[in-house]
Image (cartoon, helix red, strand yellow):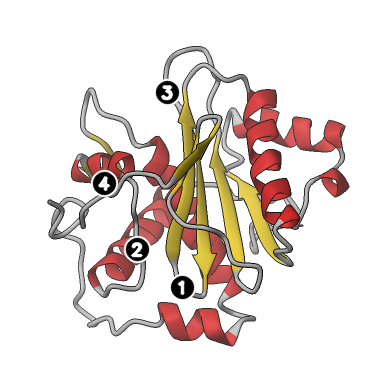
Amino acid sequence: MKGIDPIRTMGQVRWYKHPHPTCTYVVSLDPATGTGGDAAGIQVIELPTMVQIAEWQHNLTPIGGQMKVMMDIMQYLQELQVEQIYWSVENNSIGEAALVVIRDTGEESFPGTFLHEPNKVQGKKGRKGFHTHHKNKMEGALAMKRLIENGKLTLHSKNIIRELKEFVARGTTFAAKPGGSDDLVMATLVAVRMITYIAQYEDAVYDQIETSVDDDDDWNGPLPIGVL
């Protein structure tokens, strides 16, 4: 993979491709505290092409501002007559604060469909957003790896490609190397999980992400393969 420069910026949102009204768009947020530590990240993936068209990343934007950026992106897509928009957030730790903002703002105020974890999380039925734990983080990372290697997922951002170079196995999970960051990667993992869920109902998406995986396809290296 080789990153490209954005074709335009809207505030701090970098756009790599013009949205098309007949396509479906997945918008995912990996939230952060917004106090100067880890950054929050947003990814926008086009379906069924599986092309990254936009992203946002910042470490000083409070959670309310993160949700506002996400809403602005979706409103922009809506203004372009896009009919199918799916969005979600990681609901771990600070993600609970994002759910509060969504509740107080009104879920109906956000364009598109809010996707949720299809399974119960720690016995909590109907919890909104996507919960990340060791198992599904590993599954998501492996799914993303296969999609990239099979040419099914196109990432344009130089920033996420830089993060992928340092996104490695650490114990029973995946994370950035010490001193690195993985905010955009984590937002992409949420998007991949959303896309996997959508593929159960959208034949065009299922056909695009279907890959041949050997029974012995075990994880044995850092992400990704062939990054320049």
- N-term mark: 2 or 1: 1
The residues bearing labels 2 and 1 have C-alpha atoms spaced at a distance of 9 Å
In front of the other: label 3 or label 2?
Answer: 2
Q: Where is residue 44 in the image (x, y as percent from the top left)?
A: 52, 52
Q: Residue 133 carries which label?
A: none
The residues bearing labels 4 and 2 have C-alpha atoms spaced at a distance of 11 Å
- N-term mark: 4 or 1: 1
Could you tell whether 202 is left or right of 163 in the image?
right
Q: Is label 4 in a helix, a strand or a loop?
A: helix
- N-term mark: 3 or 1: 3
In front of the other: label 3 or label 4?
Answer: 4
- The structure residue drawn at horizontal position 13% and vertical position 59%, both measured from the top left corner, is 226
Q: Is label 3 in a helix, a strand or a loop?
A: loop
Which residue is labeled 4 in the image?
161
Kind of residue at disc 3? Asp
Q: Where is residue 215 in the image (x, y as percent from the top left)?
A: 24, 82
Which of the two residues, 177 or 80, is positioned nearer the viewer here? Answer: 80
The residues bearing labels 3 and 2 have C-alpha atoms spaced at a distance of 25 Å
The residues bearing labels 4 and 1 have C-alpha atoms spaced at a distance of 19 Å
The reply to whether callout 3 and callout 1 are in contact (CB within 8 Å) is: no
Kind of residue at disc 1? Thr
- The structure residue drawn at horizontal position 46% and vertical position 57%, both measured from the top left corner, is 17
Which residue is labeled 1 in the image?
49
Could you tell whether 39 is left or right of 220 in the image?
right
Which residue is labeled 3 in the image?
38
The reply to whether callout 3 and callout 4 are in contact (CB within 8 Å) is: no
Which of the two residues, 93 or 65, is positioned nearer the viewer here? Answer: 65
Which of the two residues, 5 or 72, is positioned nearer the viewer here? Answer: 5
Q: How many labels sit on residues?
A: 4
**Residue farthest toward the top in the current orientation of the protein:** 35
Pointer 3 local density, CA inside 10 Å: few below 14, some 14–19, many at least 20: some
